[in-house]
Image (tube, rainbow, N blue to C red):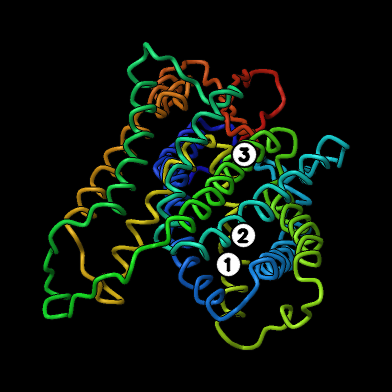
């Protein structure tokens, strides 16, 4: 590795290192949303088991976000206080903005929309129906988020553009594919690890009144979650500290959820007691994974790819559950579910392809930079300054003759 900071070889070396990491930067949003869906896949099973044991959904929401607050707060206090700026001399730059009235109101709304409204509506709707029915209803999330993002102009839509058409049709396809997975079974697909297992059919249907009531509550919760995603994306523009934002959401969700739980569970102090059982496991798992980490990862990905990108992967959770159930529980796979999974994958591909043009960099490519630097007879030194918030790369050239040493990142 060259050691002379004036040497063009050092610049070339560092640019090549950036090129080697370019694939990871592109894959990071996909890794984040897939991890998010894998984590959410286990929540329904644990929370449904806890609710079946008599746990109050209001208390579950409170304890869940209390755990999330305790888990995320230390990271927010330490890591969000300072951000390291990579330059020739190490600098410490504050990144946590000051709390304003506008930001405070947004935090209150964020703590109310998802932790209180969405989760309580979802759990109550699950009580009236089934976990499968509730998960299927939530597959309308990409469509609602897409419409809301388009209304508030967070999503670019030009109906004459083929990429915008791909985003629209891809969003519809993900919803349609998820509904096919739920509503259409078809013949059983025999796999070598499920051959010989007994086939169990589901027990009686859902009462029509309960189904209507449950579907209405889940739809309200889904709309609330979509509003939460949009508001989180807007808030990150003025409060770009993801860890602190996550901690604040969990804290306000705990406080606001406690007020609702005290009202709904008044006269029932036993509802607040939990033991070392499935209830505690559901609280800890959903708090750390599905609230703390989920809000944080969601915010990171949204700053880079937008809210529609995050919600478009939500139907992937059903595919993950189906695969995990097949391996772990030995459940049978049906042809309808396989067809639905293929439709979901195609829809996701259309959304990703349609949105890829929204994030193309207008800066020169790495190869062009290296080639330009090699042919410079004056040995101009090119400094690369990386904005840690906007993730944009700005380049500026400094002549080495008669000037101070340039800053190199």
Residue found 31% across the figure and 70% down from its top? 325
Residue nearer the viewer, 335 or 324: 335
Q: Nearer the viewer, mark 3 or mark 2?
A: 3
Q: Assign a secondary structure to mark 2.
A: helix
68 left or right of 40 in image: right
Please state the horizontal and vertical placement of residue 330, each as a whole percent of the image. 25, 76
Q: Which mark is residue 286?
A: 1
Q: Quadrant of residue 154?
A: top right
Please state the horizontal and vertical placement of residue 174, each as a whole percent of the image. 35, 41
43 left or right of 342 in image: right
In the rendered image, the quadrant that contains the C terminus is: top right
Compare marks 3 and 2 and give the one earlier in the sequence: 3
Please state the horizontal and vertical placement of residue 170, each as a whole percent of the image. 34, 33
Compare marks 1 and 3 and give the one earlier in the sequence: 3
Q: Which mark is residue 291?
A: 2
Residue found 61% across the figure and 59% down from its top? 291
Residue nearer the viewer, 17 or 153: 153
Give me the C-alpha separation between circle 1 and circle 3.
21 Å
Q: Assign a secondary structure to mark 1.
A: helix
Tag 1–tag 3 contact (CB < 8 Å)? no
Tag 1–tag 2 contact (CB < 8 Å)? yes
Q: Residues within 10 Å of mark 3 (few under 14, many from 20)?
A: many
151 left or right of 259 in image: left
Residue found 53% across the figure and 70% down from its top? 47
Residue bearing the label numbered 3: 227
């Amino acid at each position: 590795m060259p050691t002379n900071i004036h040497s063009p070889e050092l610049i070339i070396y560092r640019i090549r290192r950036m090129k080697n990491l370019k694939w990871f930067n592109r894959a990071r949003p996909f890794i984040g949303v897939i991890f998010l869906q894998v984590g959410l896949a286990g929540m329904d099973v644990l929370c449904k088991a806890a609710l079946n044991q008599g746990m109050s959904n209001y208390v579950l929401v409170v304890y869940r976000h209390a755990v999330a607050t305790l888990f995320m707060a230390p990271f927010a206090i330490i890591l969000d206080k300072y951000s390291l700026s990579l330059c020739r001399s190490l600098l410490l730059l504050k990144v946590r903005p000051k709390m304003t009235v506008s930001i405070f109101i947004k935090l209150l709304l964020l703590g109310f929309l998802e932790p209180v409204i969405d989760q309580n509506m979802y759990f109550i709707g699950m009580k009236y129906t089934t976990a499968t029915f509730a998960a299927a209803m939530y597959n309308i999330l990409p469509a609602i988020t897409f419409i809301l993002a388009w209304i508030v102009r967070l999503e670019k839509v030009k109906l004459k553009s083929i990429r915008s058409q791909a985003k629209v049709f891809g969003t519809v396809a993900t919803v349609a594919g998820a509904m096919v997975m739920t509503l259409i079974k078809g013949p059983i697909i025999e796999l070598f690890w499920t051959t010989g297992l007994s086939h169990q059919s589901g027990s009686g249907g859902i009462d029509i009144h309960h189904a209507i009531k449950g579907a209405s509550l889940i739809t309200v919760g889904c709309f609330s979650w979509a509003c939460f995603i949009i508001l989180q994306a807007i808030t990150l523009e003025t409060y770009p500290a993801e860890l602190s934002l996550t901690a604040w959401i969990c804290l306000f969700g705990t406080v606001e959820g406690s007020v609702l739980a005290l009202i709904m569970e008044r006269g029932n102090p036993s509802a607040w007691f939990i033991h070392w059982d499935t209830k505690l496991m559901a609280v800890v798992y959903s708090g750390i994974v599905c609230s703390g980490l989920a809000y944080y990862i969601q915010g990171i990905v949204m700053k880079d790819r937008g809210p529609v990108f995050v919600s478009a992967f939500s139907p992937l959770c059903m595919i993950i559950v189906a695969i995990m159930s097949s391996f772990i529980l030995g459940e049978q796979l049906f042809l309808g579910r396989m067809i639905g999974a293929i439709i979901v994958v195609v829809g996701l591909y259309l959304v990703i392809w349609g949105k890829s043009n929204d994030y193309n960099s207008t800066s020169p490519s790495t190869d062009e930079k290296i080639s330009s630097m090699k042919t410079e007879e004056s040995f101009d030194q090119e400094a690369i300054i990386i904005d840690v918030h906007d993730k944009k790369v700005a380049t500026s050239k400094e002549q080495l003759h008669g000037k101070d040493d340039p800053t190199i990142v």
